[in-house]
Image: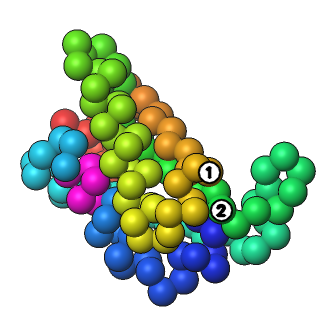
Amino acid sequence: MPENKLAGKESELVTALTEAIVGVYGDWARDLVSIRLDGVPAGRFAQGGEAVDTNASVVLGVRAGLFDRPDAADITAALGAALTDAIADVLGDELRPGTMVELVPSAPERTFVGGTLAA
């Protein structure tokens, strides 16, 4: 996220991103949502060779099985839209066109929490 847009809005953004995920999956997912915000200082994010402060990126780790579900296209579209909306709502709508959401699959046998294979 652009540091100049993120500063002072961290708590609001964490809440909005969490609610976006819960809105797609349901309240059962709330305790599984883990967020790390990385602010990028001005001049250190570029698009097309030019420094910009209108881009944001979300990387969301999901279980690989998500992509095998019959409703996978609907769920992934909902996640992409909800996370983009959360960023635009909190940090400004000018970030919407430059916001990228990447869903990264993780196989169950490669997901650990607290040093233990996640259930």
Residue at x 34% of width, y 41% of height:
79
Quadrant holding the N terminus = bottom right
Q: Cβ–Cβ below 8 Å for labels 1 and 2?
A: yes
Badge 1 or badge 2: first in the primary sequence:
2
Which class describes the residues within 10 Å of circle 1: few (<14), some (14-19), or many (20+)? Answer: some
Give, as a three-letter code, the residue at label 1: Gly
Residue 63 shows in the view: no
Question: Is 94 situated above or below 47?
Answer: below
In the displayed structure, would residue 21 be above or below residue 42?
A: above
Instruction: State yes or no: residue 19 in magenta.
Output: yes
**Foreground residue among 74 and 59:** 74
Q: Which amino acid, mark 2?
A: Thr
Is residue 97 visible in the rendered image? The answer is yes
Residue 68 picture quarter = top left
Task: Tell me the number on the disc at residue 54.
Answer: 2
Specify the label residue 98 is tagged with: 1
Q: Residue 52's quadrant in the figure? A: bottom right
Figure quadrant of the C terminus? top left
Q: Is residue 59 above or below residue 8?
A: above
> Left or right of 119: which side holds 62?
right
Q: Is residue 10 left or right of residue 47?
A: left
Magenta stretch bounds: 18-22
Query: Quarter of the image holding residue 30?
Result: bottom left
Give the SS element for disc 2.
Answer: loop
